[in-house]
Image: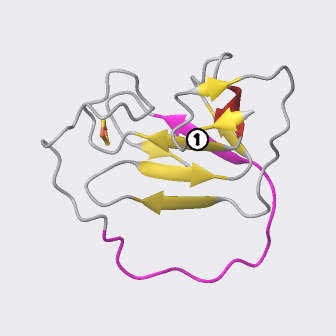
Amino acid sequence: MERCPSSALVYKDGQMTEAAVPENTVTVIYQGPYYLKGDLAIEQSPDDMPGTEFRAALCRCGLSKNKPFYDNSHDGQFKDYGAVGETGEPLMEMGGKLNITPLKDGPLLL
Ligand code: FES
C-alpha cells in the first residue's frame, strides 16, 4: 500500500500492510493542520480511508469542507505559527489507542 501523509489518498494493492508506530504523536504544522501518527481511532472516519487508523492530517483552522480532516481549504487564510508553549511531563507509559472525537463546531477531543 502506498500512502500519503494526510491519508486522503490510498493506493491499494489488496492487503493492509501498515501497522501503528509504537508512540502516538501529534505535530502542529506551521500555518496548517495537525499531523497524527500512531494507533488512532478517529470518530467519523470513513471506512474507505483505512490509513486513518495509523496517520491523519486533521483540520486546525475550522475551514475544511471534510472535517475533521484537513483539505487545504484555509489556503492563505489561516495564520498560526503552531507554537504550543511549554512541554508537559514525559510519558510514563507507551502504547494504547489514541481516541479522537471531533466536537461540533469546536475542537478535537483527544
Ligand atoms: S487546517 Fe487547513 S483546512 Fe483546516
Relative to 28, does residue 60 appear above or below in the rendering?
A: above
Where is residue 74? Give x, y as percent. 21, 37
Image quarter for ligand 1: top left
Which span is picked out in magenta? Answer: 83-102
Indicate whether residue 84 is drawn in magenta.
yes
Q: Choose between 63 and 89: the one closer to the eye.
A: 63
Where's residue 29, x and y in %? 37, 58
Residue sticking out furthest to the left: 77
Taking the spot 79% from the left edge, 68% from the top edge, the residue there is 94
Give the residue at x 62% y 44%. 55
Q: Position of residue 89 (x, y in %)?
A: 59, 83
Instruction: Determine the residue positioned at 57% across, 34% down.
Output: 7
At 40% across and 35% down in the image, what residue appears? 70
The residue singled out by tag 1 in the image is 100
Secondary structure mainly formed by the magenta segment:
loop
Query: Residue 56, position in %: x, y?
Result: 56, 41
